[in-house]
Amino acid sequence: MFCVKCGKEGETFDGLCIECFLNGKQLITMPHHVDLERCANCEEFRINGHWVATPLKEAVEDAALSSMAAIDGMRVVSAGVMTEEKDNRNFTVKADVDGKLKGHAVRSSAETIVRVKNNVCQRCSRQLGNYYEATIQIRAGSKELSDAHRDATVRYIRDRIENMAATNRGIFLTKVEEVQGGVDLYVSSTSLGRTLAKELSDAYGAETKESSKLIGKTEDGNDMYRMTYLVRMPEYHVNDVVIFEGEAYKLAGIGKGNGKLIKLSDLRESSIRRSQMSSLRVHTRFSEIIKATVVSRSENEIQILHPYNYSTVDVKIPKGAEIKDTADVAVIDGIVFFVP
Ligand SMILES: [Zn+2]
Ligand SMILES: [Zn+2]
């Protein structure tokens, strides 16, 4: 075969040798300009239909490269980009591309202008519009929810949401409202509300109750509900001294289905079902446990100063317990117990 243009013998493409075929041909093209959406609130960029947190320069380059088209049969092997900032919203991006076309190595380049446009992503528009699908109501079992307990719970929820939001853009905390008897937290999705209520139940031994309210129809005609998760925090906390069936225990832990108890009279461990835990009565809060002065110690016993009358009292301790100058004790019906 001969090239119809230069007469060179060999392989031809549309009647031309490779040199004549490539001569003057634009192998890659870019549009005159590309719009890059940036959320004015969270400053994330929309790349290929997804909002992502990415540095400006990368977003500009990604936007330019994803607008690039190569002619039929060409495979792009690598692309280098050069970005020039015209002003803080307009960037000229030049791409140099190495590729393969019909078995031959080819190079080409193209240029476009990336224009950064402000917009608001769906998450921010929902968050700014106070959107929520579920409410988590934190309440105490009997008395008022203590400030410390409320703050700890709100902090727990904030941390968990921040954590989950790192990998799921749909997740956010809409607002936190202190109300009579507790606190209400408004969250972006039903599943988030359900997950957090379950976690609080597992972590603190809280009782949860779910209710729903019909609030309208979705775009596709389904009923739309708003969920409320009532989380009743128990009076007891891990490390409190509690009374169960007339005996004093330390509540050593709370698991998914049970609680771990240590009996103060013999320091033996046992477990209690979650359903039985509602009968636990708090005797001494962890924060109010008395530190008694240790006078002397042996392997199974310590001698301490009675916290009320300062007489010396012998108190049983578990084997290998680390005892310093003071020991945690609880006084129950006049008897002093070591709290492990
Ligand atoms: Zn030719
Ligand atoms: Zn945003």
Image: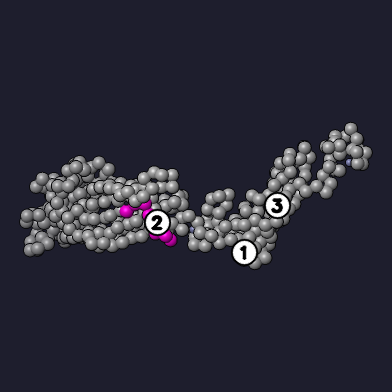
- Name the spot of residue 71 as percent of width and height, x first: 74, 43
Q: Which residue is mark 2?
A: 131
Task: State the residue lying farthest toward the bottom.
Answer: 87
State yes or no: Cβ of the residue under disc 2 lies below 8 Å from any atom of ligand 2.
no
Instruction: Tell me the quarter of the picture where residue 283 sits.
Output: bottom left
- Identify the residue at horizontal 12%, vertical 62% (top origin): 307
Q: Quarter for ligand 1? A: top right
Q: How is the image coloured?
A: one colour
Quarter of the rendering containing residue 77: top right
Pinpoint residue 28: horizontal percent, then vertical percent.
73, 48
As for residue 134 lying within the magenta part, the answer is yes
Q: Residue 99's spot in the image, x, y percent?
A: 73, 44
Whole-number angstrom distance, CA of label 3 to CA of label 1: 19 Å
- Is residue 330 shown left or right of residue 156? left
What's the amino acid at mark 3? Met
Q: Main secondary structure of the magenta part?
A: loop
Q: Is mark 3 within 8 Å of ligand 2?
A: no
Dot label at residue 89: 1
Confirm whether residue 311 shows in the render. yes
Which residue is denoted by mark 3 in the rendering? 30
- Per the image, is 53 magenta? no
x and y, in percent, of residue 219 in the image: 44, 47
Q: CA distance from mark 1 to mark 2?
A: 31 Å
Residues drawn in magenta: 128-135
| Kind of residue at disc 1 | Arg
Q: Nearer the viewer, mark 3 or mark 2?
A: 2
Question: Residue 300 got which mark?
Answer: none
- Say whether disc 1 or disc 2 marks the residue closer to the N-terminus: 1
- Callout 2: SS: loop
Secondary structure state at the residue bearing disc 3:
loop
